[in-house]
Image: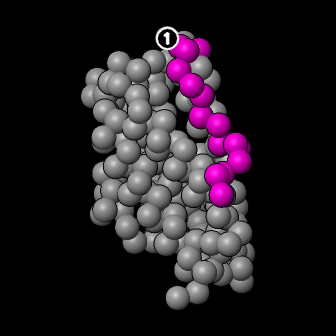
Amino acid sequence: MSEGLTPFYRGWRTYNARLVDAIRSLSDEQLKLRASPGQWPIWAIAAHTAGARVYWLCGVFKESGAEITPFIDPLSGIGWEDDESTPRGSEELVGALESSWKIVERCLAQWTPSMLGDEFTRNVGGKTQVHTRESVLMRLITHDAFHSGEISQIIGMHGIPEIDLWRPSRT
């Protein structure tokens, strides 16, 4: 099987693993921590991160795999983060992050550089938007990094070691 885009996005796997490890280490009480009262708790941020992958790749791009995630109807517009009365634990969140990552990995392995310009549309508020595979990959990478940083700040505010996405890997 071809490596497709995997060599170009190899570091993203490391970032995902570090996010998963951080979420796995948090207690249910720690997962409920927030930056401020009006902001999402950590568990909702992590759920949103996983759900966005499924939304874009399976919902918008029609890739398979949503059925292996908790987000089997990716275009519903309803995610776990939308129901704060049902907090999610680390096991559920790790499952969501890992299952959504499998979809990312498959897309990176199967998509080729010549496919990056392929256009897909979505309708938002009655308006049609056009997105390319490249633009959505960039969106997802920065989305993952943004929310990993957000979680890192929240846990750091509470004396828990931060998520360092950029520390050198052990070789």
Q: Is residue 39 above or below residue 63?
A: above
Magenta-drawn segment: 157-171
Q: Is residue 24 above or below residue 37?
A: below
Residue at (41% x, 33% y) in the render: 25
Q: Which residue is mark 1?
A: 37
Considering the whole magenta stretch, tell me its main secondary structure: loop
Q: Residues within 10 Å of mark 1 (few under 14, many from 20)?
A: few
Residue at (70% x, 61% y) in the render: 135
Percent position (x, y) of residue 161?
Answer: 57, 25
Percent position (x, y) of residue 30?
Answer: 41, 20
- The quadrant of the picture occupied by the C terminus is bottom right
Examine the image and state in which quarter residue 63 appears: bottom left
Q: Does any portion of residue 140 appear in the rendered image?
A: no
Q: Is residue 34 above or below residue 148?
A: above
Q: Is residue 54 left or right of residue 170?
A: left
Residue at (60% x, 81% y) in the render: 3
- Tag 1's secondary structure? loop
Percent position (x, y) of residue 12?
Answer: 62, 56
Q: Is residue 38 above or below residue 108?
A: above
